Structures are given as structure tokens and as C-alpha cells.
Amino acid sequence: MKNIMGKGLALGLGLAVKSKEQIESFVDELVKKGEIKKEESNEIVNELLQKGEETKKEVDQMIQERMRRMFNELNLTTKEDLQRIEQRINLLEQKQQQEIE
């Protein structure tokens, strides 16, 4: 079974974006070939789905971090920067309005 899991994990990032149906089809083929037992198939599908989700989350985090670094290097304004500026403007407008009254 470990060998089969290794084969499944060897799919790498492709596995992360595969649908549950595609993974089930992959595991069903392994059952048909006699490489795994039918009783093991559900467990293997669940493990592959979990590993795929974990891999996808890791890749998403790496992409987000890389994008943050790129924005910083390019000195581009982020959404958070704009929100901070809007908050400051709102506070200044409120102070100005209070001074007028």
C-alpha cells in the first residue's frame, strides 16, 4: 500500500487540482489492476484528497507570499494601504468637522 501511496503522491501538484472523481477513477484503475484491494480504495482516496488539499494550500501560500514580495519590490499600493489611507482621511474629516462646529 505504501508503494501505491507513493505512486499517488508522485502525481505532485497535478493531484492537488484533480477532482474527487478523477482521484476515484485513478484508484479504481489500481483496484482493477490488482495493485490495491477494494477495501483499501476509500482510505486511499481520502488520503490522496487530503494530501492534495494540503499541497494546494501550501502552493497558494507560496504564491501569495511571492506576490506580496513582488508588490513590495515594485512599490505598488496594496488594498491594505488604501484602507489605511481611507481611515486616515475619514479621521481627518471628522476632526475638521468637529473644529467647524
Image (cartoon, rainbow, N blue to C red):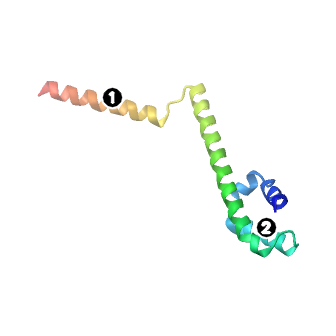
Circle 2 Cα neighbour tier, 10 Å, few/some/many (<14 / 14–19 / ≥20)? some
* Three-letter amino acid code of the residue under disc 1: Arg
* Three-letter amino acid code of the residue under disc 2: Phe
Q: Is mark 2 on a helix, strand or loop?
A: helix
Q: Residue 56 or 67: which is nearer the viewer?
A: 56
For the image, the number of numbered tags is: 2
Identify the mark nearer the N-term, 1 or 2: 2
The quadrant the N terminus occupies is: bottom right
| Position of 76 relative to 53 (above/below) | above
Q: What label does residue 80 carry, if any?
A: none
Residue 9: x and y in percent read 78, 55
Q: What element carries label 1?
A: helix
In the picture of the structure, the residue carrying the numbered disc 1 is 88
In the picture of the structure, the residue carrying the numbered disc 2 is 26
Q: Residue 50 or 19: which is nearer the viewer?
A: 50
Residue at 68% x, 50% y: name it.
55
Which mark's residue is nearer the viewer, 1 or 2? 2
Residue 80: x and y in percent read 45, 35
Residue 59 occupies quadrant: top right
Residue 32 occupies quadrant: bottom right
Which residue occupies the extreme left position in the image? Answer: 101
